[in-house]
Image (tube, helix red, strand yellow):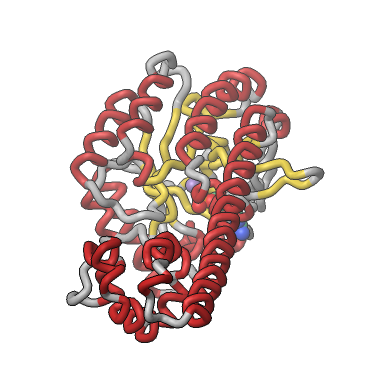
Amino acid sequence: MINKVLGSNVTTKKILATETLGESSHLRKSILDYFGLRFILLGGLVMPHQSVLATPTTNQLEFSEYQRQMEASVIGLVFILMAVATFFSHRLLAVWEKRKQKYRFIHKLAHDEFILYYQPIVNPDQHKVMACEALLRMKDNDNILSPFHFLETVEELGLMERITLWVLQRVIQDYPEIKAHNQHLDDEFYISLNVSFKELASPSFIEQVKEILAHVDLTEIKLCFEIIEKYHLENQSLTNQVIRELRSLGVKVAIDDFGDEYANLDMLDKIDYDIIKLDKHFIDEIQTSFIRQASVLFIGKVIEYYQKRMVMEGLEYPKQLEVLQELYPGVVYIQGYLYSPPISLEEFKVFTLKSVE
Ligand code: G
Ligand code: MN
């Protein structure tokens, strides 16, 4: 550092060697003059060496000038200490805040302040609830917040995997309760939950998923992992291996938000899946967009060929169902406000489908 400031002619060794310095006060003066400002800024660093430099008897440097430099160094030192203190106190505060927030979320998780809502997925032809999607909500005083308000923070705090595992455990716990109370569900009724590619690529996450599933009879408790493609599929072979394992255990896999920004046609080739969930845009634009219409027909062909299933998300009006069924005569499951918004466990246990005509 000192070398850098003083240049290559003046080595640190020379500066630090008392004898050398005692003999060459002109060197000190030129250093102090030339690097005045830097000395002020580096006051803190130079301070210890000032005592070495302080050999007043042989010093050609005026005492007042020496004093001025000393004072400048002290001021510099104070500035540096203040800057360092400010920098660290800010960092410390930020770390402290983050830690507090993290524990607030963990506390919420342990005290049932995270809850699951369930949104029915319906076969409109049979007029039957075939499945539902578990959707995370967070209690905040008297409000029930949707993930939009807290998911980013959860990710920033590094709690996503922990929360997804909590969702998995809660779904496993709720499934028999729902099945026992609600007599109107299809025999193959399954519960979907959202998992990201990032999580599927995390060995520790998958280990814990397997550990949880090892204690579950998956022929009784039917699950579907909806893969949300917010992050790009990075390690395709690893992810595919995980997906294959999940499917071999009997867990369904769905491509969520298909047709949205990230989930595109490529995905149908890249991963093994059971279900394609078409993003809400499809139904919103089904009357106006030729591309959306053609896509529905195309996905219809794909799922028929591969014997998969299609779920249309975000249907709100009877007219939309009518248009969809006119366009595509095959089976499309529906998830949307048309049948029901996401509802609480208690509501879902007694949920019955009303006519939507
Ligand atoms: O991305 P994913 O499909 O997992 O998210 C489902 C979300 O879409 C839920 O939060 C749910 O509240 C919302 N949703 C479900 N059905 C409808 C609908 O018919 N209209 C609108 N606007 N939102 C819906
Ligand atoms: Mn989803």
Q: Residue at x 58, y 42 (%)?
A: 99
Residue 128 in which image quadrant: top right
Q: Position of residue 122 (x, y in %)?
A: 54, 42
Residue 351 in which image quadrant: top right
Q: Residue at x 32, y 55 (%)?
A: 232
Q: Residue at x 57, y 28 (%)?
A: 185
Q: Quadrant of the N terminus?
A: bottom left
Q: Is residue 138 left or right of residue 21?
A: right
Q: Farthest residue in the right direction?
A: 142
Task: Decide: is 342 above or below 224.
Answer: below
Q: Nearer the viewer, residue 246 or 125?
A: 246
Q: Position of residue 107 (x, y in %)?
A: 65, 32
Q: Residue at x 54, y 55 (%)?
A: 88
Q: Nearer the viewer, residue 28 or 174?
A: 28
Q: Position of residue 97 (x, y in %)?
A: 62, 48
Q: Farthest residue in the front direction?
A: 57
